Each structure stands twice: as structure tokens, then as C-alpha cells.
Image (spheres, rainbow, N blue to C red):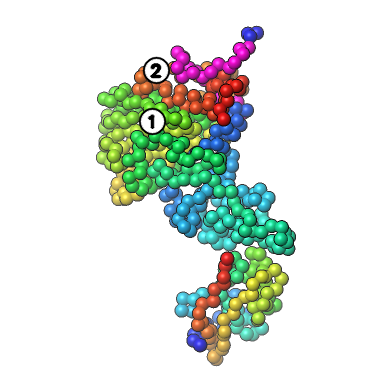
Amino acid sequence: MAWKRLCALGDVAENALRKFEVDGVPVVAALVEGEVMAYPPLCPHMAEPLEISGICDGGTLTCTKHLWQWDMKSGGELGLAEKPLLLYPVKREGDAVLIDIEQELVYDYD
Amino acid sequence: MSELRKEPVLYDSGQSMPYVDSRIYSDEGIFAEEIEKIWKKIWLVTVHESELPEPLDFRTLTIAREPVVIVRGTDNKIRAFRNVCPHRGNLIVRKPAGNLSVAEPSGNANYMTCMFHAWQYDCFGRCVDIPRMKQGYQDRLRKEDISLEALPCEVKHGGFVWLSLNKNVEPLAEFTGEAFDIMKVELDTEPLDIFHYHKAIIPSNYKLWHDTNSEFYHDYMHYFNRATSMMQKGYFERQYTAFPNGHCTVGSMEVKYEAYQGAKERPLSFPGMPRNGWKMVDLFPGATYNIRGSSLRVDTTTPIGPNLVMIEFRGLGLKRDTPEERAQRIRDHNTIWGPFGRNLHEDLLGITGQGVAMRPGTEPRQVLHGRHENNSIHDEIGMRHFYAEWQRRMGRSPSDPMRELSLAAE
């Protein structure tokens, strides 16, 4: 385990993905029902940048390019999605949000 | 009414006064047949590789009415594809040039996306995404079985991208044959680099432009050429050489640029090219490589209609040029061949006038190709050689074009 600082709690919001970089690793994060969630930044389908094309609504993330959708809490597929969303472990320490990046999570694009 | 001859009059370059009938420049039917029998069958020179220097750089163009996209792959190899989606026949890449790393609004970075239904293709032409493929096609169609149609494509003769719409076309080396021998050292010793591009869309026939590039008798139109060349030693010794498939070359002379007030000699050159030398290679059906000492000009024509042609002009130097050398080459190029240069607009005015006098609906006229001067610079062998090839490929005589010859070429 290697916990690193991702951001301050106030840096992330409900229904909005924001991109961060932690030791050179790109990550997108959002608040989901008060809990910070962090994901790799590209859509597992066609590598679309999710901070640009992703829409969050009621705990569901939709990539607007081809309408793949996921449950933001579990990363599980909804609707047309054929691959799950990967999640980074995240925890809070006071006002700081910490992320565990042992290894960069990358989807397997064929 | 005169009696109709049994057989059309053959275009015979050996006869005492060869001529063409002006309807080869104005007839819609002949134009459509040229597109099919010549332009869709043959090798054509297009862009220069230095116009796509980085992986995923692309250029789009239309040849013989067919949309084409040229892409430099992630493996650095240049390929050409029909720029048409196999799904519903739509144009895919719509920008004239760019890099595929920039995503289209309905696509993803690094791919060519058809904006209609978002089918996507990679730089190798392979289909990489079909939205809701399984829901709509079940197992009847797989993206792995779909690709853009790759066209024969070779980077050759000074780093130009040659391509053909004919997948059974002969190897390029066979088509150009020995026509480039005269310019091989200049073109292929070291990499070239483009420094100039402009185009002219002229209400005239494409062959009239190639005719102008294939004869020098029209130096009577260019004061600059009379002063710096026709009046100088060696001009009338310049020789035309004809090669198979309709190509020809023009041998060099030493141009005396300083004989035109304000012009200067050109200290820069190309490998193997004497200072102030001047060579040309005219390629069937409508391209010319032209080196005047320090700069290479390459003309490519795109026929749009019987009386409309797009001519693209590229200027090139050596890739290793210093900034000062490059600036000098650009000056040398533009003083003669730029849009405001001394010669080029005169040539364009020449074919614009022919385009008026021989436009569709005008009276059929005989256009003379009869200058014989031992293949020297005012001999019209370049044009005659071109029309002999035109006759072979079209199965029509340029002198009597409205009837097909029985001995049509394959």
C-alpha cells in the first residue's frame, strides 16, 4: 500500500469528473453520494477522455461517445457497457483525500 | 454532305501535319471516358511525404472523382485508402489535412471516424468500432471483417506519394520506366522538403496544361525566358526524349538569369545538377517535375470537367537546407513560379484563352502539333508522344475522336 495525496475534499464535486495527476499517473475523481471515487481517466471502450465526454447523474457515469454506462460506486456495467470501470482505492484523512496507486490501472484495448 | 469515312483518321505523329480535334478538350462524353480509361487506371503522383511528417498525419484529396485519404501509420509507413465508409457510402475524413490524434466530435483520438454512424477505422484501414454491433448485426457482421479499401501506394521519385485507383496496376517502376533517369541523382540522393504550395482552378482542359508543359515554342509568350534562355547558348540544343507510357524529358542548359534585369544567377542547386541548369520530366497523364537550378517545382493536375482543371504547384528544396539557403530557394522559386512570379501566370493565361476558344459548344477546330526540329526544344514531339499514348489508352484518335477505333487498347 502506498497512499498518496490526491486532492483536498473541496476539490471534487457531485456529478462532475475532475482530472488529477498523482506522481505522473492521470486519474479522474468525483463525489458520489458524499464519497470520493477515483478511476483511470480513459473510457474502457475507445479510450475517450472521461473528464471531457463523461456525464455523471444519480450515481451513473455515461460516456457520451457511445453511451457506455457504469455504476459509479461499484464500477459495474450498465446498459451498453461491455467492460467494467476500474476503481482506485481512496480514503479520507481529515480534509485530504488519499489514493492508493500501487500500479497505474490501464484497460486492455484490442 | 460529304461521305463518312469507313475508319476514323488515326493520330499519326509521323504525318506531315499532325493535329488534334478540339472536341478532345470540350466533349463531356470523352471526358467521362478519360476518367474511366486513364485516370482510374494509372499511377498518379500526389502529395509529398514531407506534407505528412509525423505518424497519424493525414491528407485528403479527390482523384478521378474518388475521395482518397493518405495516412502515415504509427509504423511510419504511408498508406492510401478510399475515403468512403463501407457502411453507408459516406465520406469519412472531411478535413484537407491534420493529425488523427485529434478526435472528431463523434469519434475517438487516433482513429478516422465516419460522422454519420460513428464507425471508426485505424491508420491501417481496419475497422475498430461499430456502435451497437451485436445488437444490430448479431453474428452476421464483425468489425474484424470490415476495412477501408487500400489503394496501391508507393513513395518514390523524390519522396512523392504515388497512388492508383486500380488495384491491378503494374508496379510503379514499370510505369515510369527510365523517364526519371535524367533526374534521379537530383531527386534521390538526399531527402527533399516542401516549401511552397498553391493551386489554380482554371476553366480549361487538363491536357492543355500538360501540352504547355510539354512544348517550349511558347517561350514567345515569356519575355523572361527569351532573355535568359532563348537568346543564350545551348537553348536550341535542349533535347526532348520520349519514353514508353507517354512520358518525356527535356534536357538541360545553362540559364543566364542575370540577363533579365533584376534577376540574379542562382548559386544553389541540387545534387548532380549544374548551377543554373534546367531539366524537366513530363509524365502522362498530367504531372511535371521541373528543376530550375535551386528549386524543384512539381505540377499535378486534377481534371474536374472537360473545361475545368485544378493544378497544384509544389516547390521543394533539400531537407538539410540552412534557413538562409531555404530563403534563397524560395526567392528563386517565387520570382518565376510563385503566384506573382514572372512566368507562371502567363502560362495560366495561355490555357485560359484556349479554354475560352475551345470550350464546350464551340466549333470543332484542328489544333496543330506539326513542329519537327530533330526533337530539339521547339519540336512538338512531347505533345505528339502524349497523344499517341492517349490514343492507345482511349481507343480513340485525337484527330477524329467522336468514333471509336476498332483496335482499342486493353
Outermost residue on the bottom side: it is: A94
- Asked if residue B200 lies left or right of residue B376, the reply is right
Which residue is pictured at 50% across the width and 36% down the height? Answer: B301
- Between B120 and B312, the one nearer to me in the picture: B120
Q: Position of residue B14 (x, y in %)?
A: 45, 17
Query: Are dots 2 and 1 in contact, CB under 8 Å?
Result: no
Res. B175 mark: none
Residue located beneath label 2 in the image? B372
- Toward which corner of the image does residue B268 lie, by quadrant? top left
- The span shown in magenta is B4-28
Disc 2 is placed on an element classified as: loop
Mark 2 and mark 1: span between their CA atoms?
Answer: 16 Å
Where residue B210 appears, as percent x and y from the top left, is: 47, 30
N-terminal label among 2 and 1:
1
Q: Is residue B77 above or below residue B338?
A: below
Local crowd size for mark 1, using a 10 Å CA cut-off: few (<14), some (14–19), many (≥20): many
A5 relative to B262, above or below: below
Marker disc for residue B249: 1
Question: Measured along the vertical axis of the image, is residue B383 above or below residue B72?
Answer: above
